[in-house]
Image (cartoon, rainbow, N blue to C red):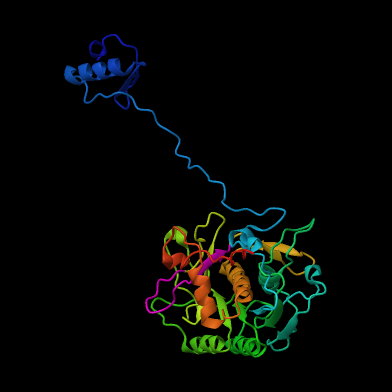
Amino acid sequence: MSEALGGDAAIIIPTLGIAVVGPKDGDEARNLAMRLQSSGVVESARPEFYMFATTELVQAPMYADTSRRTWGVAAVQAEMSGLTGRGIKIAVLDTGFDLGHPDFAGRHIEARSFVPNEDVVDRQGHGTHCAGTIAGPGRSDRERPRYGVAPDVHLHVGKVLDNRGSGAESWILLGIEWAIASGCQVISMSLGRPTGPGEAPDPLYERAGRRAWNNDCLIVAAAGNESSRQFRYIAPVGAPANCKTIMAVAAIDQQLDVAEFSCGGVNSGGGEIDVAAPGVGVFSSFPMPQRYRKLAGTSMACPHVAGLAALWAESDSTLRGARLMDALKSTAMPLNLPSRDVGHGLATAPAPKVA
């Protein structure tokens, strides 16, 4: 072995049967490798390689909250549109609302509970958070950024989920009927149930969605949070978002990547994702005394789109019902992701009008 090495200093690791010769330049290393290979005393010889740490570079998020606005408001371009949802009625069918929240002081809010023996006060938090994403104040202050997409909408709150966060279908359907009868142009429903593989849309909710369309109203619903994408499991879009007459909203994160939990359009014959919206680390209002909280879910993505629907409805009085849904889909920003996961892309606000 020493003859083959030609007297070169080497690190010999006998238990592995490996020797590492001292540093050589490229030509010397290649020549030595050839001598060793032809000596007959070694099995193989080659120049030494360098190895590198395999840590993946962590990219900074494309969007982040600032003192002026949340990342969601920025991503959907609400702050740039100049529109505020003025003159548009939105119904939030959820766990109710904290009517004493200081960010909504002086606001006229229509509120009604469809949950037997429970008032409209939100003791769970989900409804206040969703309503805040739609209609929170349009300006930041010392304590919080702007977090409302359409701050001047006329807010209707229908409590259809109880204080534990669940609700009977009859309560939800009564809430839909109330919202339509109240003249709401948009209904936001961050609620649903899981569906199974191949499960068809529920005709009951298709009927409700079509009735909304026929009354110049659009229902927007959360796609569901049952996926586990780290394990390559994509759950079907939940009900009622899987109906063709109801807009299904997926969740994306600050990198504009689909959220790990977000359901996808994997059932044939219905259940497609229509658009995506911010649904990770979403800052919004929460019942007192906490006042604010960050939450994640397609529940958080849904009110972003409901707020955007109000901006589009304000921008053009002919955009109602099915036409409003088409406008949101056709103006969505394409994402480099499968339509199965994000539909037409990231929903966005109308561009500012040029004088």
Question: Does residue 193 appear anywhere in the picture?
Answer: no
Numbered range of the magenta stretch: 264-279
Nearer-the-camera pick, 82 or 156: 82
Q: Horizontally, is 58 left or right of 15 in the view?
A: right
Question: What residue sits 81% from the left and 68% below the top?
Answer: 102
Locate residue 220, reporting x and y percent.
56, 77
Residue 168 occupies quadrant: bottom right
Is residue 332 inside the magenta stretch? no
Residue at (62%, 61%) from the top-left corner?
A: 72
> Quick one: 228 or 14, which is closer to the camera?
228
Give the quadrant of the N terminus: top left
**Residue 127: image x %, image y %?**
68, 74
Please, is residue 149 above or below residue 5 in the view?
Answer: below
Q: Position of residue 210 (x, y in %)?
A: 51, 87
Q: Is residue 274 magenta?
A: yes
> In the figure, 150 relative to 5: above or below?
below
